[in-house]
Image (cartoon, grey):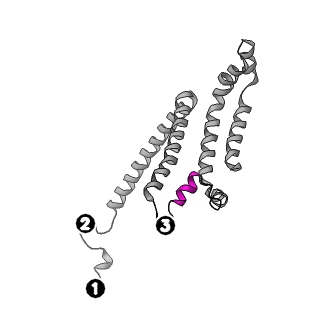
Amino acid sequence: MAGAALALVVLAASALESVEASMEESAQILGAGRWRTALAVTGRPVAPAVLSGALVAFVNAIALFGSQAVVGLPGRVFTLPTRIYALFDYPPQYGLASVLSLIFVGLTVNLTLQHYRFVLLEYDVTRRAIVNSLILASGTATLAVLIGSFVGWLDLRTAPGRSGRSPRWRSWPC
């Protein structure tokens, strides 16, 4: 579990280092309190990194089933992944296991969509970068399709036996 929290700490620390101290000092000089400075000045640039770290930590914590199983199953201490695993014992309860698994799927999809919404809609730089990368990707895909079509056309034009005759080596008598 410590490895899962490490992603959150590393991403948040790198984002906190990028915040300029002059912005925080300016906010405090202009009369903002500590909490307002922390939320408005420091929180906005750090929020995408904290959300990314939380998402990585959440997915990593779900994936670390082994440690939860070793510690929890013998002592009958159930976490959600170990409970889902226990539902496959005899008699298996596939329906309940599926419903409990949907909780994980729902949480992961919700956190991912919230992260993308926040990053895409709140930051103009990332929005421009994504638009530029989509334009580049669609241009590259179009070029690849055109080149592939041309190569296919050349292959059909130069294929032996295109005129309806059999290839020369097959017409030789045996």
Answer few, some or many: residues within 10 Å of disc 1's Cα (few below 14, many 20 plus, some between 14 and 19): few
Q: Indicate left or right for 166 with 104 as reference.
A: left
Quadrant of the snapshot with the C terminus: bottom left
Q: Which residue is mark 3?
A: 90
**Image quadrant assignment for residue 123:** top right
Which of the two residues, 139 or 51, is positioned nearer the viewer here?
51
> Disc 2 residue type?
Ser
Q: Which residue is mark 1?
A: 173
Check residue 122 for magenta coloring: no
> Disc 1 residue type?
Pro
Q: Determine the CA span between mark 2 and mark 3.
A: 66 Å
Q: Determine the CA span between mark 3 and mark 1.
A: 70 Å
x 24%, y 71%: residue? 165
Say which of marks 3 and 1 sits in front.
3
Task: Residue 130 in the image: state x and y as whole percent.
Answer: 52, 35
Task: Residue 31 in the image: state x and y as whole percent.
Answer: 72, 12
Of callouts 2 and 3, which one flags the residue occurring earlier in the amino acid sequence?
Answer: 3
Check residue 81 for magenta coloring: yes
Q: Tell me: residue 130, above or below residue 122.
A: below
- What range is drawn magenta here? 77-90
Q: Which residue is mark 2?
A: 163
Task: Residue 71 in the image: state x and y as whole percent.
Answer: 67, 58
Which of the two residues, 104 or 157, is positioned nearer the viewer here?
104
> Disc 3 residue type?
Tyr
Assign a secondary structure to mark 1: loop
Answer few, some or many: residues within 10 Å of disc 2's Cα (few below 14, many 20 plus, some between 14 and 19): few
x 51%, y 33%: residue? 117
Residue at far bottom of view:
174
